[in-house]
Amino acid sequence: MSTTRTSASAAERAGREILEVLLPHRRAAEPDPHLDTAEDFPEQLRRITGFVRRDEPVMFSLPGFPCKSPNPDKVLGHLPDHGERLALRFLGSLCAEITKIHSPGAKILICSDGHIFGDVIGVPDEHIDAYGHELRRMISAEGLSAHLDTFALKDVYGPGLSYDEKRKIAAETLGPSIGELREEVRGDESTLRMYRGITKFLMEDVAQWEGSRSALQRECRRRAYEVIARSWAWGELITEHHPDNVRLSIHPQSRGEAKFGIRLVGAADVWTTPWHSVVLRHADGTWQLMHRRRAQRLGREVYEDGRPSHFEAPPADAATEGTGG
């Protein structure tokens, strides 16, 4: 039986076009992403072109969508809300755009990493399971199952082990030691940037702390190393199970790196994600991620399916009523 293959020149041309679909949404470490070209991302171009040449759907892996922040000042609860829904729709739209270029289409595997470090960030496994279940329900309800799928720690090492046992196996067999990671942070700008970003997030996620701020900072620095080590172990596990996939990341990435940073929903900074925030709809119809405490000041809470979903800002004229002297 013969296998359909696309010519090398046609595959390379389509590969560049597919990468150009992603470029406007890149979560960049550089200040000038408007200068990006497809040739700046040889690893992604090589992998995408390989799928095109084999006339297969382009497969992406995206670690993320772990669980909601445990800080109620940042989120509406422990289940996905409209922020996740918008992010899923966006990912589905990318796959639909790629299908216009490459008829077999594309699929993004959402590699939910909550269980790999849930014990470190203080989120119970029950909440992570509930978050994952609702995320899969959203994918189905939005009609995105042809484009999006999920992968999680529950899918590896067999059904008889607890999450604690699975975390231990992954960390010990696939992750770096904390000493190795400290060396990496000292010597690599990208890793240092991630370490600082995760330390910041961990400090913001603490809802209650009885000690000093300096003690909290020390604790979050310690935990940041553990989070990164577990995340790297998770990345290795994804590679083991899906070695050919194009690797996406919700963290800022530099040109030429093996991972391609992707921005899911508009936010004021490059680190904010739907699971660390809520989403506010501005009067002009645009959406923005922000912490719940700020969104409450700017808009009213909106419910969907009987639970909080997002916030909506009032029309500009209504927001300025009563401000005259």
Image (cartoon, rainbow, N blue to C red):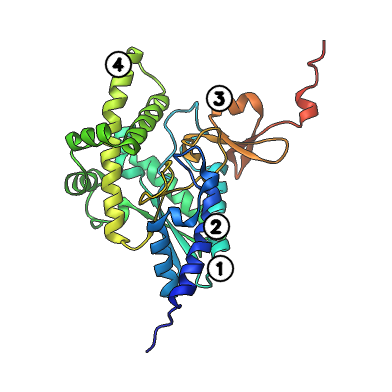
Tell me the residue that label 4 is attached to: 215
Observer-side mark, 3 or 2, equals 2
Which of the labelled discs sits on residue 21, or is there none?
2
Mark 1 and mark 2: span between their CA atoms? 10 Å
Which of the labelled discs sits on residue 177, or is there none?
none
Q: Residues within 10 Å of mark 1 (few under 14, many from 20)?
A: some
Tell me the residue that label 1 is attached to: 101
The amino acid beneath tag 2 is Val
Label 2 sits on a secondary structure element that is: helix
Specify which label sits upstream in the sequence, 4 or 3. 4
Frontmost residue, 232 versus 315: 232
- For the point 26% across and 47% down, which residue is it? 233
Mark 1 and mark 4: span between their CA atoms? 53 Å
Percent coordinates x, y for residue 137 in the rendering: 50, 54
Q: Residues within 10 Å of mark 2 (few under 14, many from 20)?
A: some
- For the point 49% across and 74% down, which residue is it? 10
Q: Is residue 45 above or below residue 88?
A: below
The reply to whether callout 1 and callout 2 are in contact (CB within 8 Å) is yes
Q: Is residue 314 above or below residue 84?
A: above
Mark 3 and mark 2: span between their CA atoms? 34 Å
Observer-side mark, 4 or 2, equals 2
Tell me the residue that label 3 is attached to: 293
The amino acid beneath tag 3 is Arg
Left or right of residue 21, residue 43 in this image: left
Mark 3 and mark 1: span between their CA atoms? 42 Å
Q: Residues within 10 Å of mark 3 (few under 14, many from 20)?
A: some
